[in-house]
Amino acid sequence: MSVLPMENRTTIFLNVVMLFSVSLEPYLFNLVTLFGHAAETQVVEYASLLYALDMAALMAILAFFTHELAIEERQLISVELLVPYRRVRNTMLVSAGLFLLTMFPQFWSWRIQDVPIRFYFWIAPLAVFWIGRALVVPSKSNQKPL
């Protein structure tokens, strides 16, 4: 992110929106964790909708920033990093779409062991990132000599 040009209007706006979304995330996550303990399940349901929207916004903004870095003509990062950055961008876009998908009411009403399926779907982006990181083979230039 240190090489991302921050002087254009879109980048500044998205950075502010991202900071606002980051500040909302812990509050919404705390409300979502009240599931099963709160008498007002409507509050938890609405909080989970807003949490999914918030996480989708975060993922989409990060995908946009990564896309800006991965534009080859700008030469903001080395050529060897273009493919990994594009892969990360695509993963973030899929994650944003997944969070948006879980906003449909069916993902709240369908349940596994009395837990809304929405919560299970939120684990998928984490799994994708962990698996993706495990599959990345470090290049020889990044390895330290013995």
Image (spheres, rainbow, N blue to C red):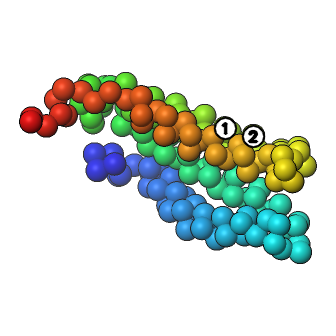
Do tag 1 and tag 2 residues touch (Cβ < 8 Å)?
Answer: yes
What count of labels does the image hold? 2
With 131 as the anchor, is 73 left or right in this view?
A: left
Q: Does residue 82 lie above or below 119 as drawn?
A: above
Q: Which residue is mark 1?
A: 97
Q: Of the residues shown, which amino acid type is indicated by label 2?
A: Leu
Which one is nearer the viewer's eye here, 20 or 43? 43
Q: Residues within 10 Å of mark 2 (few under 14, many from 20)?
A: some
Residue at x-position 67% and y-position 47%: 122
In the rendered view of the protein, which quadrant contains the C terminus? top left
Q: Position of residue 115 (x, y in %)?
A: 82, 53
Residue at x-position 48% and y-position 40%: 130
Q: Alpha carbon of mark 1 to alpha carbon of mark 2: how far?
A: 6 Å
Q: Which disc number belongs to residue 65? A: none
Work out whether residue 89 can be spotted.
no
Q: Which residue is mark 2?
A: 101
Q: Position of residue 11 (x, y in %)?
A: 44, 49
Q: Does residue 96 lie above or below 49 as drawn?
A: above
Residue at x-position 79% and y-position 65%: 35
Q: Residues within 10 Å of mark 1 (few under 14, many from 20)?
A: some
Q: Secondary structure at mark 2?
A: helix
Which one is nearer the viewer's eye here, 11 or 51? 51
Q: Secondary structure at mark 1?
A: helix
Q: Position of residue 59 (x, y in %)?
A: 56, 46
Residue at x-position 70% and y-position 52%: 52
